[in-house]
Amino acid sequence: MTDKRFIATPSRTKEILQKYHFTFKKSLGQNFLVDANILVNVMKKAGIDKKCGAIEIGPGIGALTEQLAIHADQVVAFEIDQRLLPILKDTLQDYENVHIIHEDILKADIQSVMGDHFHPGQPVHVVANLPYYITTPILMKLLQQHLPITSLTVMMQKEVADRMAAEPNSKSYGSLSIAVQYYTTAKVLANVPKTVFMPQPNVDSSILQLTMRETSPVMVNDETYFFQFVQACFAQRRKTLRNNLISFFKQRMPKEKVEEVLQQSGIDGGRRGESLHMEEFASLANTFWKKEQQIV
C-alpha cells in the first residue's frame, strides 16, 4: 500500500526535514512515523471513514494527518511546535478538510473546537502518535472531560499501553489501569517496532484502542475521591491494602478506624491492590467515603 506520494516514508520524510532545516526537539518527544503501511492499518482499526471526524494530537510533518484526511470527513490537528506550521501548510496543501490548530492540547477548549469543526452527532475519533513524555496527562484530560468522542486509537510507549489495558493480578495493573478502564474499554491492537520512527526512540511502541463507555462500569459516590483512593492503594505495591490505607488516612482517621472500615467492607486488608477488581475498589472507596462523611 506504500505510495511514494505519502509523507510516511523515510525518503519523503528526510526530504521534508532537509527542505525546512528542521531539527527534532527532544523536549517535545518528536518521533515521526516513516511507514505508511502501519498508518493505513491504524485507519482500518480505528474505523475511520467519511462519516466521521478525527482529532489528532501532535501531527508533526503530517504523516498520520494525511491518512486521516484521505479517510475521514474532517480532521482537526493540535500542534504545539510553531516551527511545524509552515511545513504542515505545505505537506497538507491538497487536503481542504484539515484544520491545524496551534495550541497546547492540555490548554485547549476541545469541546468548543469540536463544535466548530464537526457536525452535531457526528462520530469523532481521536487518532494520534502521542509524545511519550505527556501521554497520560493528555489521555486523562480527554477522558475526564466527558467529550463526545467515540474512541481513541493512539500510539504510545508499549509499557504505558500495557499498564492502561492491564487486568488484575498482573505486574502492569495499577491505578492507571483503573482510571482508564473506568471511562473506556482498553485493548492493545498491535506492537510497533522502534525502527519505523525517525529518529528512533529508545523503546518500542504499541497501538492502544480505547472505546468510550456509555456508562461507568461501577457506581462511585465521588469520582475524584475514588481515583485518589485507588492511587493510595497502589502507593507502595508491596504493601497490603491495610498498610497503604493507614498511611493515606493518617491525618484524617486513626488506624483502628481504618481497620474497622476494612472489616465493614468485607474486603481483606491483607490483600494487595493488584488483586482487587474495579468493583471491589468501588465498594471499598464508597465505604470509606461514607465513613468520612459521618466523621465530618
Image: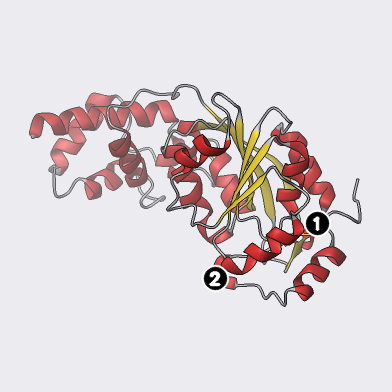
Q: Quadrant of the N terminus?
A: top right
Question: Going 69% across and 59% down the picture, which residue do you hit?
Answer: 88
Q: Relative to 204, is 102 on the left or the right?
A: left
Give the image quarter of residue 294: top left
Question: Going 65% across and 42% down the picture, which residue do you hit?
Answer: 75
Q: Position of residue 124 (x, y in %)?
A: 60, 33
Residue that mark 2 sits on: 27
Q: Quadrant of the C terminus?
A: top left
Q: Position of residue 102 (x, y in %)?
A: 54, 58
Judge whether 82 appears above or below 115 on screen: below
User: Residue 8, labelled with which disc?
Assistant: 1
Q: Callout 2, which amino acid?
A: Ser
Name the element at disc 1: loop
Can the viewer see residue 174?
no
**Alpha carbons under labels 2 and 1: distance apart:** 22 Å
Bin the neighbour count of mark 2 within 10 Å (Cα to Cα): few under 14, some 14-19, many 20 and up.
Answer: few
Q: How is the image coloured?
A: secondary structure
Mark 2 vs mark 1, foreground winner is 1
Q: Callout 1, which amino acid?
A: Ala
Question: Going 51% across and 26% down the picture, which residue do you hit?
Answer: 213
Q: Position of residue 59 (x, y in %)?
A: 65, 55
Q: Position of residue 177 (x, y in %)?
A: 49, 40
Q: Relative to 125, is 104 on the left or the right?
A: left
Which of disc 1 and disc 2 is earlier in sequence? 1
Judge whether 138 appears above or below 121 on screen: below
Q: Residue furthest left?
A: 296
